[in-house]
Amino acid sequence: CVNLSYLDVSTNALTYIPSSFSNLTKLEYCNLENNEIVTTPNCFNDLTSLRYLNLRVNAARVLYADLGGMRNLTQLDMSVNSITTLPLEIGLLRSLQELKLHRNQLVTLPPELGSCALLQKLEVPYNALEGSLPDTIGLITSLVHLDISFNQLDSLPRSIVGLQHVSPLVCLFH
Protein backbone atom coordinates (compact mmCIF):
# COMPACT_ATOMS: atom_id res chain seq x y z
CA CYS A 1 0.00 0.00 0.00
CA VAL A 2 2.95 2.39 0.12
CA ASN A 3 2.17 3.49 -3.46
CA LEU A 4 -1.43 4.36 -2.57
CA SER A 5 -2.31 7.83 -3.89
CA TYR A 6 -6.12 7.92 -3.33
CA LEU A 7 -7.91 6.86 -0.16
CA ASP A 8 -11.61 7.27 0.61
CA VAL A 9 -12.83 5.67 3.84
CA SER A 10 -15.65 8.14 4.46
CA THR A 11 -18.82 7.22 6.32
CA ASN A 12 -17.50 4.34 8.40
CA ALA A 13 -17.00 3.93 12.13
CA LEU A 14 -13.26 4.62 12.31
CA THR A 15 -12.17 6.03 15.67
CA TYR A 16 -8.45 6.69 15.14
CA ILE A 17 -5.73 7.00 12.54
CA PRO A 18 -2.93 4.48 13.10
CA SER A 19 0.63 5.81 13.32
CA SER A 20 1.54 3.64 10.32
CA PHE A 21 -0.66 6.00 8.28
CA SER A 22 2.39 8.24 7.92
CA ASN A 23 3.98 5.51 5.75
CA LEU A 24 1.58 6.42 2.92
CA THR A 25 4.06 8.96 1.57
CA LYS A 26 2.60 8.91 -1.96
CA LEU A 27 -0.94 9.65 -0.77
CA GLU A 28 -2.38 12.70 -2.57
CA TYR A 29 -6.12 12.51 -1.77
CA CYS A 30 -7.53 11.40 1.58
CA ASN A 31 -11.21 11.46 2.53
CA LEU A 32 -11.88 10.47 6.15
CA GLU A 33 -15.20 12.33 6.38
CA ASN A 34 -18.06 11.19 8.60
CA ASN A 35 -16.30 8.84 10.99
CA GLU A 36 -15.59 9.10 14.72
CA ILE A 37 -11.90 9.89 14.41
CA VAL A 38 -9.99 11.59 17.17
CA THR A 39 -6.75 12.79 15.56
CA THR A 40 -3.51 11.42 16.88
CA PRO A 41 -0.02 12.96 16.83
CA ASN A 42 2.53 12.01 14.19
CA CYS A 43 0.11 10.46 11.72
CA PHE A 44 0.45 13.27 9.13
CA ASN A 45 4.12 14.16 9.52
CA ASP A 46 5.49 12.36 6.45
CA LEU A 47 2.54 12.87 4.10
CA THR A 48 4.42 15.38 1.97
CA SER A 49 2.54 14.41 -1.24
CA LEU A 50 -0.90 14.94 0.27
CA ARG A 51 -2.89 17.64 -1.52
CA TYR A 52 -6.44 17.06 -0.22
CA LEU A 53 -7.44 16.08 3.32
CA ASN A 54 -11.05 15.86 4.45
CA LEU A 55 -11.64 15.13 8.14
CA ARG A 56 -15.08 16.73 8.18
CA VAL A 57 -17.66 15.37 10.66
CA ASN A 58 -15.43 13.53 13.11
CA ALA A 59 -14.57 13.78 16.81
CA ALA A 60 -11.28 15.68 16.53
CA ARG A 61 -10.53 18.06 19.40
CA VAL A 62 -6.91 18.84 18.60
CA LEU A 63 -4.86 19.44 15.48
CA TYR A 64 -1.27 18.48 16.16
CA ALA A 65 1.92 20.21 15.05
CA ASP A 66 2.70 17.41 12.57
CA LEU A 67 0.05 19.02 10.36
CA GLY A 68 2.82 21.38 9.22
CA GLY A 69 4.64 18.49 7.53
CA MET A 70 2.05 18.31 4.74
CA ARG A 71 3.82 20.95 2.67
CA ASN A 72 1.90 20.23 -0.57
CA LEU A 73 -1.56 20.33 1.03
CA THR A 74 -3.89 22.59 -0.96
CA GLN A 75 -7.27 21.76 0.64
CA LEU A 76 -8.04 21.01 4.27
CA ASP A 77 -11.54 20.52 5.63
CA MET A 78 -11.84 20.00 9.39
CA SER A 79 -15.43 21.21 9.67
CA VAL A 80 -17.89 19.80 12.21
CA ASN A 81 -15.41 18.68 14.85
CA SER A 82 -14.63 20.02 18.32
CA ILE A 83 -11.33 21.78 17.60
CA THR A 84 -10.54 24.60 20.03
CA THR A 85 -7.18 25.84 18.70
CA LEU A 86 -5.07 25.63 15.57
CA PRO A 87 -1.40 24.77 15.90
CA LEU A 88 1.10 27.49 15.04
CA GLU A 89 2.44 25.09 12.40
CA ILE A 90 -0.63 25.89 10.28
CA GLY A 91 1.60 28.65 8.91
CA LEU A 92 3.91 26.01 7.40
CA LEU A 93 1.19 24.99 4.95
CA ARG A 94 2.51 27.31 2.26
CA SER A 95 0.59 25.52 -0.55
CA LEU A 96 -2.77 25.71 1.25
CA GLN A 97 -5.48 27.29 -0.90
CA GLU A 98 -8.66 26.29 0.93
CA LEU A 99 -9.23 25.94 4.68
CA LYS A 100 -12.66 25.01 6.03
CA LEU A 101 -13.26 24.96 9.77
CA HIS A 102 -17.04 25.31 10.05
CA ARG A 103 -18.74 24.38 13.31
CA ASN A 104 -15.81 23.88 15.64
CA GLN A 105 -15.03 25.62 18.93
CA LEU A 106 -12.23 27.93 17.82
CA VAL A 107 -11.81 31.01 20.01
CA THR A 108 -8.97 32.57 18.01
CA LEU A 109 -6.98 32.14 14.82
CA PRO A 110 -3.18 32.09 15.09
CA PRO A 111 -1.19 34.95 13.51
CA GLU A 112 0.83 32.29 11.66
CA LEU A 113 -2.16 31.83 9.37
CA GLY A 114 -0.89 34.95 7.62
CA SER A 115 2.01 32.87 6.26
CA CYS A 116 -0.39 30.86 4.09
CA ALA A 117 0.21 33.21 1.17
CA LEU A 118 -1.67 31.07 -1.39
CA LEU A 119 -4.85 30.78 0.70
CA GLN A 120 -7.86 31.73 -1.42
CA LYS A 121 -10.75 30.48 0.71
CA LEU A 122 -10.99 30.67 4.50
CA GLU A 123 -14.23 29.55 6.12
CA VAL A 124 -14.62 29.62 9.92
CA PRO A 125 -18.35 30.19 10.50
CA TYR A 126 -20.16 28.86 13.58
CA ASN A 127 -17.18 28.90 15.92
CA ALA A 128 -16.53 30.92 19.07
CA LEU A 129 -14.06 33.45 17.62
CA GLU A 130 -13.75 36.42 19.97
CA GLY A 131 -12.27 39.89 19.74
CA SER A 132 -10.72 40.32 16.32
CA LEU A 133 -8.98 38.34 13.63
CA PRO A 134 -5.17 38.42 13.71
CA ASP A 135 -3.74 41.46 11.98
CA THR A 136 -1.67 39.13 9.77
CA ILE A 137 -4.87 38.19 7.92
CA GLY A 138 -4.13 41.18 5.68
CA LEU A 139 -0.96 39.45 4.46
CA ILE A 140 -3.01 36.83 2.64
CA THR A 141 -3.44 38.89 -0.52
CA SER A 142 -4.61 35.85 -2.53
CA LEU A 143 -7.71 35.52 -0.31
CA VAL A 144 -10.91 35.82 -2.38
CA HIS A 145 -13.46 34.26 0.00
CA LEU A 146 -13.62 34.87 3.75
CA ASP A 147 -16.51 33.57 5.86
CA ILE A 148 -16.34 34.52 9.55
CA SER A 149 -20.08 34.55 10.17
CA PHE A 150 -21.77 33.38 13.37
CA ASN A 151 -18.91 34.05 15.77
CA GLN A 152 -18.43 36.53 18.64
CA LEU A 153 -16.06 38.94 16.88
CA ASP A 154 -16.45 42.55 17.96
CA SER A 155 -14.04 44.13 15.47
CA LEU A 156 -12.00 43.56 12.34
CA PRO A 157 -8.29 44.29 12.03
CA ARG A 158 -7.27 47.33 10.00
CA SER A 159 -5.24 45.07 7.73
CA ILE A 160 -8.47 43.66 6.29
CA VAL A 161 -8.55 46.59 3.87
CA GLY A 162 -5.53 44.98 2.19
CA LEU A 163 -7.71 42.09 1.08
CA GLN A 164 -8.64 43.66 -2.22
CA HIS A 165 -9.76 40.42 -3.88
CA VAL A 166 -12.16 39.22 -1.18
CA SER A 167 -15.60 38.67 -2.59
CA PRO A 168 -17.76 37.88 -0.75
CA LEU A 169 -16.75 38.84 2.76
CA VAL A 170 -19.33 37.15 4.92
CA CYS A 171 -19.19 38.71 8.34
CA LEU A 172 -22.04 38.76 10.82
CA PHE A 173 -21.54 40.04 14.34
CA HIS A 174 -23.59 38.97 17.34
Image (cartoon, rainbow, N blue to C red):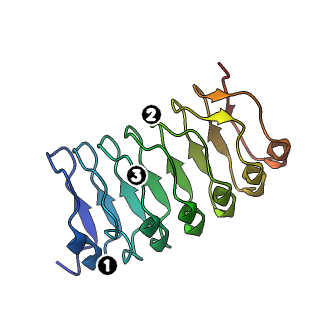
The residue under the point 80% across, 41% down is 157
Residue farthest to the left, as pictured: 13
In the picture, the disc for residue 134 is none
Packing grade of label 1 (10 A; few <14, some 14-19, many >=20) is some
Q: Quadrant of residue 156?
A: top right
Tag 2 residue: 103
Tell me the mark number nearer the camera, choosing from 3 and 1.
3
Q: In front: 127, or 148?
A: 127
Q: In this view, does 48 lie to the left or right of 144?
A: left
Q: In front: 107, or 96?
A: 107
Measured as percent of width and height from the top left, residue 116 is found at 63, 62
Quadrant for the N terminus, please.
Answer: bottom left
Measured as percent of width and height from the top left, residue 55 is found at 34, 50
Tag 3 residue: 62
Tell me the mark number nearer the camera, choosing from 1 and 2.
2
Distance from the alpha carbon under mark 3 to that under mark 1: 25 Å
Q: Are marks 3 and 2 in contact (CB under 8 Å)?
A: no
The local secondary structure at tag 2 comes to: loop
Residue type (three-letter) at the residue carrying disc 1: Lys
The residue under the point 45% across, 55% down is 76
Tag 1 residue: 26
Residue type (three-letter) at the residue carrying disc 2: Arg
Q: Quadrant of residue 4?
A: bottom left
Measured as percent of width and height from the top left, residue 38 is found at 28, 51
Q: Is residue 101 left or right of residue 133?
A: left
Q: Establish if 169 lies above or below 51.
A: above
The residue under the point 65% across, 18% down is 174
